[in-house]
Image (cartoon, rainbow, N blue to C red):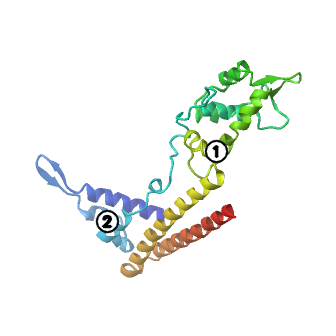
């Protein structure tokens, strides 16, 4: 029910913005009664401008957090070895298993789809550059040169493995520190949660003061306020743990 109400609210806000359009120098308006007939008495707040203005203040997560989910690399980091960091991530992957990987091991699809490399061709280059070899049991092993590179770039795997927040191999690698990265992102998330709490608190007070009979809406915004307060507490606890 809440989801349906929110969908209708967004639709009404959209129609309000489009209420006046010019067609052949004539103003065309969409009478609210055409929408209102689909709503019951509990939905009167849809036609309250105060509600529309509050809804439009929803915090944008992207404006509170660093980085972007659009891409996890940008090739801006220039390595001494001539490889791209996303290619060296593959080298690190080959060494992730202590007993070694078989030469015919299945390489994860994310190297193709997320990092846009051809793992087979890059692996052939590793062989050609004497970074890896295959032992008598068909296991891929590192040469001394390869071990040095794997150790040098092992942080790439830690960056890659973060799922909770956006990250970028090239932007984050040079001064990589897992704790500092997570603390910064948690603090950003706290600011977003504070803004979201205020947003839902304002809507909660709006319904309590002007539409006290809309119990579903009041309960929903109460739950949202509780959620974001709990989220702030959890994030602060995680920061404290990382700092200890």
The quadrant holding residue 90 is top right
Q: Secondary structure at mark 1?
A: helix
Residue carrying label 2: 37
From what the image shows, is residue 129 above or below residue 101? above
Q: Nearer the viewer, residue 1 or 141?
A: 141
Q: Can you name the residue that lies furthest to the front here?
A: 80
Distance from the alpha carbon under mark 2 to that under mark 1: 53 Å
Note whether 202 is above or below 102 in the view shown.
Answer: below
Reading the image, the residue beneath label 1 is 159
| 2 vs 1, front mark | 1
Q: Nearer the viewer, residue 49 or 237?
A: 237
* Disc 1 packing (10 Å; few <14; some 14–19; many ≥20): many
Which residue extends farthest top?
Answer: 128
Q: Position of residue 116 (x, y in %)?
A: 58, 30
Q: Position of residue 30 (x, y in %)?
A: 23, 58
Vertical order, 218 against 81 (above or below): below
Q: Residue at x 41, y 78 (%)?
A: 205
Residue placed at 16% from the left, 49% from the top? Answer: 22
- Residue 232 in view: yes
Element on which disc 2 rests: loop
**Which residue does the image show at 62% across and 46% down from the upper left?**
176
Q: Quadrant of residue 156 in the image?
A: top right
Residue at 58 percent across and 44 percent down: it is 172
């Amino acid at each position: 029910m809440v989801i349906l109400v929110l969908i209708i609210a967004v639709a009404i806000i959209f129609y309000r913005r489009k209420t006046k359009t010019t067609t052949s120098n004539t103003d065309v308006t969409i009478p609210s009664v055409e929408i209102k007939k689909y709503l019951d008495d509990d939905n009167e707040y849809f036609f309250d401008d105060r509600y529309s203005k509050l809804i439009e203040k929803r915090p944008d997560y992207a404006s509170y957090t660093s980085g972007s989910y659009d891409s996890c690399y940008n090739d801006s980091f220039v390595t001494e070895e001539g490889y791209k960091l996303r290619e060296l991530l593959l080298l690190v992957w080959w060494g992730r298993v202590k007993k070694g990987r078989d030469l015919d091991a299945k390489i994860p699809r994310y190297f193709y789809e997320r990092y846009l490399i051809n793992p087979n061709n890059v692996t052939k280059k590793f062989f050609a550059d004497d970074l890896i070899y295959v032992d008598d049991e068909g296991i891929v092993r590192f040469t001394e040169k390869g071990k040095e590179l794997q150790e040098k770039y092992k942080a790439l795997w830690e960056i890659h493995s973060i799922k909770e927040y956006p990250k970028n191999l090239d932007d984050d690698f040079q001064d990589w520190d897992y704790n500092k990265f997570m603390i910064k992102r948690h603090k950003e998330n706290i600011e977003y949660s504070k803004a979201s709490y205020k947003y839902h608190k304002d809507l909660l007070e709006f319904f309590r003061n002007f539409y006290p009979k809309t119990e579903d809406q009041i309960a929903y915004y109460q739950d949202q306020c509780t959620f974001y307060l709990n989220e702030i507490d959890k994030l602060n606890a995680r920061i404290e743990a990382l700092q200890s």
